[in-house]
């Protein structure tokens, strides 16, 4: 895995496909770059890994293999995802007629938009992603030396470098937001240094 610096100019090249409607009537819009490739970023680095304040969880079905995980964001990555959220609101507003069949104001989009960066009180901002813990799309986990390792029993307490793919925009009722998924994850024990 290699380290990437956040580049906000990437956003201008992104585009949303037309809606796909599932059996329950929920809409999703695939995100891609003009070359057809997915929007993928390695967030953090070996030198500056992320941590997760909680273990991966599912709020309504703990037996599911697809769970949610949150990563604490350092400043440069918080700025990157805040920039992506700002771009998203503008793009959705400008393309609302094509996407939703009606023109929405930027205020209407902002009202329903769920940012990628979660902020709760005085806690550090976090990036919320989906992670598959088993099955055909199981996350590939790596050591800091680049070797494949088993999916950890718990992510809290580890140093983590996720490779995040922004898969698609979802629309459920008035809520609009992104589904981001972890395909690869570097996992290592928190490094300890002598305090003396």
Image (tube, rainbow, N blue to C red):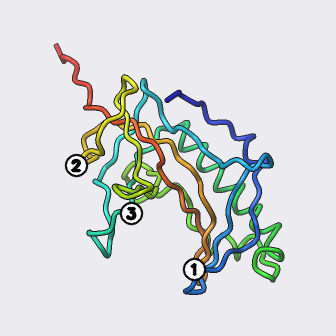
Q: Mark 3: give few (<14), some (14-19) or many (20+) Cα within 10 Å.
A: many
Residue extending farthest bottom: 24
For this view, does 79 lie left or right of residue 142? Answer: right
Task: Decide which of 195, 14 is in the foreground and name it.
Answer: 14
Q: What is the x, y in percent for residue 192?
A: 22, 24
Q: Which residue is mark 3?
A: 66
Q: Looking at the image, which residue is at 75% across and 65% down? A: 17
User: Which of label 2 and label 1 is nearer to you?
Assistant: 2
Is 153 located above or below residue 119 in the figure? above
Secondary structure under tag 2 reads loop
Q: CA distance from mark 3 to mark 2?
A: 14 Å
Tag on residue 105? Answer: none
Q: Kindly identify which residue carries mark 1.
A: 172
Looking at the rendered image, the quarter that the C terminus falls into is top left
* Callout 2 crowding tier (Cα within 10 Å): few <14, some 14–19, many ≥20: few
Residue 47 lies, in percent from the top left, at: 42, 23
Contact? badges 3 and 1 (CB < 8 Å): no
Q: Is residue 12 visible?
A: no
């Amino acid at each position: 895995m290699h380290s990437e610096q956040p580049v906000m100019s990437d956003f201008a090249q992104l585009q949303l496909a037309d809606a796909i409607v599932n059996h329950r009537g929920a809409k999703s819009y695939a995100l891609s770059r003009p070359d057809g490739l997915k929007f993928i970023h390695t967030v953090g680095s070996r030198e500056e890994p992320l941590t997760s304040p909680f273990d991966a969880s599912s709020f309504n079905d703990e037996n599911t293999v697809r769970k949610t995980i949150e990563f604490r964001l350092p400043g440069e990555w918080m700025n990157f995802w805040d920039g992506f959220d700002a771009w998203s609101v503008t793009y959705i507003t400008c393309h609302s007629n094509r996407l939703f069949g009606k023109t929405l104001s930027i205020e209407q989009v902002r009202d329903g938009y769920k940012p990628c960066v979660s902020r709760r009180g005085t806690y550090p901002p976090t990036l919320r992603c989906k992670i598959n813990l088993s099955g055909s799309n199981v996350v590939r986990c790596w050591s800091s030396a680049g070797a494949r390792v088993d999916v950890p029993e718990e992510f809290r307490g580890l140093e983590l470098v996720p490779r995040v793919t922004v898969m698609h925009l979802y629309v459920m009722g008035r809520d609009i937001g992104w589904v981001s998924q972890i395909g690869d994850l570097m996992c290592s024990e928190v490094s300890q240094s002598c305090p003396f």
